[in-house]
Image: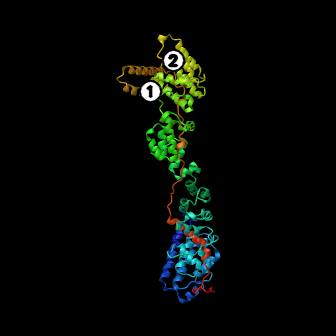
Amino acid sequence: MTYNDEARTPAGPGADGSPTRAEAVAAWREQRLARRRVATQADGVDGFALRRWRRAGVFGAEAVLRVQEIVEELLDLETFEGDLPEDALDVLRRCRDGEPVVELSGAVRSVVESAEPAKAVAVLTVVHDAKLPWLAPVGERRLAYLMGEDTATLEAEDFPAPSEDAAGAFALLRALRGDDAGHLPSSVCTSVLPWAPLAVLDDLIEADVLTRGSAPWQLRESRHEQRYLMARLAPEELAPEDIQELDWTDARERRQFLEDADAEWTEGGVCDLLQRAAEGDTSMLKELEDALPRPLVLELRRIQDGAVTGNWDSDVLADRSLWRLMSAMWTPKAAVNPARSDFHALTALRYAYDAVAIGELKKARLQLDKFGEFEDADPRLQAEVWNMRAYLALLREDLETALFALGRIDHDIPHARSNRQLVQRRREIPRNDRPHPSNPYLELGLPNGSEVWKHRYRDLRRAYADDRDEAARLNRAMRRIQQAEHAEDWSAFFVLPLNEDAFTLPSAPPAVLIPPLEALPRRTESQSPAALSAVRDRAVAGLLPTMLNAPRRPDHQHRTTA
């Protein structure tokens, strides 16, 4: 006999030093093999025994041997399956001890109903193969169909009623075998959700039978299965720890990107491409388009179109997460009107500062003049505008204008206060005795106090090796910085910018271009044979009461009596 020889064997020795469960199973198997060897060596079943077994509905020597094996198997379950009906076990013991009784088929059914579904399949397979008269006619047809016999067919009256197929396993198996899962009734779906193998639920998801509204994760006990089904149908509801447990790279990167997390993205992925675009690498915008769904491709092109002239729709301008990308796409060719939007105001400020840093003072003045009395700007931005105006006036030795501009800045800003003091001290020094007014860091194109000035100086000296005037300017800036570091006194330098953060573009990622989180691709085998076998086992176990019947004679006309 080959059915279900495996037993459930949790590991671990007994607390009292008794054999482990695995050792007990091994011993049980040895005993069973010994009994089978004895049965094999026997000359068969004598006529007296055959007559007694007929009372239990077992006819023929071969059938008797097969039933004896069933009895032995089921009695072995007593040790490993937990609570089993004691009255049924008593009947099995009597039959094993040579006293077969008419109640045998009922006892077999009672024990199998209390065991795992695979045991019901194994027992009924033997019943069917040995042609034991324990099956009702409809049970024979149903069992042949469930076991997948090629010639098995069922008439409409053979299909179990919903009350007989309470778990929905028969209806589910029939639908899966016929590739008709899409027409599975919703009542059956509800019945199978708590127990159906995960691969089967994936089949139902792909057949659009299970949807987000079905919420199958609410009926599963396994936390992993709950996460998996939610990822398949409602991924946006997953918590970060759920995504981590599922080891779902795309979802994890998407969440990290939206949270502006400092992370490494999969090269060539959407997050990687968006990050590179926002940082100024616009060479990969075509590649980004290829990675985005069509609606987002159109959104990206709308942003690109605006960058041609610096004119965007109001909703784009209002989305600060897009500013870095827009700034990377758009390089103003002339002074920017800061009154057009907050983005244009910040761009104008950066444009003016860049002009100051590269020594194009006329361009800087033209841009600063665009601000005029732009009182609606961010106070930090206004402070930087007045500070740059003061610096340009300082370079012209127009100290009164510089003091006026600095007077428009909040006195509580430390660097603005030190700048006013610098201009006031300079006003008391004769013009011919005054040091050079420029900030040497700015002459190198760096913000005040930058620690990388030496590298910048060397790079510029190499770039202007043949320009004596430029080399002299760079050397002057280098010496002034060295003198300040030696004296640890930078008070002679006009501080610009007052606050670098005022020039910084928002760091929020361009969330509007992040594709919606798609469902997790299935991770189970489609039409899994193991999953189908599990559904079949469940169907057999569920229909067991309609299959096993009281024993009948071969002519099927009347019941035997004890």
Q: Is residue 501 visible?
A: no
Q: Which one is in front, 551 or 79? A: 551
Residue 113, percent across and down? Answer: 61, 72
How are the colours assigned in the image?
rainbow
Quadrant of the image occupied by residue 89: bottom right
Q: On the image, numbered disc 2 is attached to which residue?
A: 394
What is the x, y in percent for residue 420? Answer: 56, 18
Nearer the N terminus, badge 2 or badge 1?
2
Q: Label 2 amino acid?
A: Leu
Q: What quarter of the picture does the C terminus occupy? A: bottom right
Q: Nearer the viewer, mark 2 or mark 1?
A: 2
Q: Pick out the residue farthest to the left.
A: 466
Residue indicated by mark 1: 453
Q: Is residue 148 visible?
A: yes
- Label 1 neighbour load within 10 Å: few <14, some 14-19, many 20+: many
Q: Identify whether 191 is placed above or below 296.
A: below
Q: Secondary structure at mark 2?
A: helix
Q: Residue 561: where, in percent of width, then height?
A: 63, 86
Q: Is residue 160 above or below residue 466?
A: below
> Residue 451: where, in percent of width, then height?
47, 28
- Asked if 384 appears above or below 300 in the picture, the reply is above
Q: Residue at x 56, y 48 (%)?
A: 240
